[in-house]
Image (cartoon, rainbow, N blue to C red):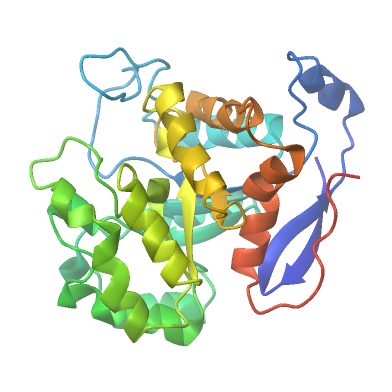
Amino acid sequence: MKSIVLTLGLLILLLPGCNRESDRESVQLLGSINYAEPIIDMHMHTGLPEEIPEGIPAICRPSPCEGTGKSVVNPIKLMRATIEAMDKYNIEKAFLSGVDWDVVQQWNNASPDRFIPSPFILNPEEVGIEALKEEYIAKRFKGMGEIGTQLNGIKPNDPSLEPYFQLAEEMDIPVLIHAAGIGPYMPNFRSSSGSPLLLEEVLIKHPKLRLYVENAGYPYRDQMIAMMYQYPQLYADVSTITWVIPREAFYDYLKAFIHAGLGKRIMFGTDQMVWPDKIGAAVEAIKEAPFLTKDQKRDIFYNNAVQFLSRNDKEKLINTNK
């Protein structure tokens, strides 16, 4: 699979080509789903922030439930399985974060220009802001986040995060934050620390900050819609909720944002952690949504991410539907 790289703010892969027609044809034979069109995945990880055994099923909600797939915890095998799935579903670019900065760079080196490498921030006290700034200056990192401090019970408006938001705004770095009511079963996770309304003071103080919220703040639907109405710079992804909750619940949630007129600011993500099988599940959840038009699907899969990553660029988007 070859790609043509077009610079729109950050390097974003736009019009893809293919040198394996037989592979492409075989992918298109999987039901009625066509994976030939490019996808940008705005939420992917090199692993989990905590260790888990090899081969266990993916997380699911609500309990009791039975997850599917098998975890791949060997870092090399996980990287290879993830890139293989990206090739299969034509994911041309992915926002990739990890706690171990060296591992993030290993993935980036293994598939150059495929990733937007970013640091996973779990505890702001453990990440040196000056060392992080050097990584951006050297262009080893191009995004910030996932800011997953909610997993430790730290709210998004906590003063300890202020230097990170300031740095991201100054350097025009896109930021992904976990601000939602659900997350991993970690002892310090607090649903109350994920209210999207807690982002209000952050956005007021940093009006040029490029910020997007994991899972569109699920299940804080009305709060998230209010914030996106009031703050046009705020975007959202639909990532884990494409596969971790019942499909009907996801569709009800996504439909509310579409009906609210926010279809141009919802971005696709898989939240691939250690279950590469979930990449396909996330893609199919959007592809099979009966209430989305073809144009709305292309916006979610691709165009909205291009617009977010190149927000200040006035060039017209390539029409990938042709």
Q: Residue at x 87, y 30 (%)?
A: 20
- Between 266 and 175, the residue placed more toward the observer is 266
Quadrant location, the N terminus: top right
Q: Residue furthest left?
A: 187
Quadrant of the image occupied by residue 83:
top right
| One can see residue 306 in this view | yes
Quadrant location, the C terminus: top right
Task: Pinpoint residue 164: horizontal percent, then vertical percent.
Answer: 31, 76
Q: Residue at x 8, y 41 (%)?
A: 187
Task: Pinpoint residue 221: horizontal percent, then vertical percent.
Answer: 36, 47
| One can see residue 92 in this view | no
Q: Residue furthest front?
A: 259
Q: Residue at x 42, y 78 (%)?
A: 168
Q: Residue at x 47, y 82 (%)?
A: 208
For this view, does 215 lie left or right of residue 93? left
Above or below, 19 relative to 221: above
Task: Pinpoint residue 274: horizontal percent, then vertical percent.
Answer: 39, 32
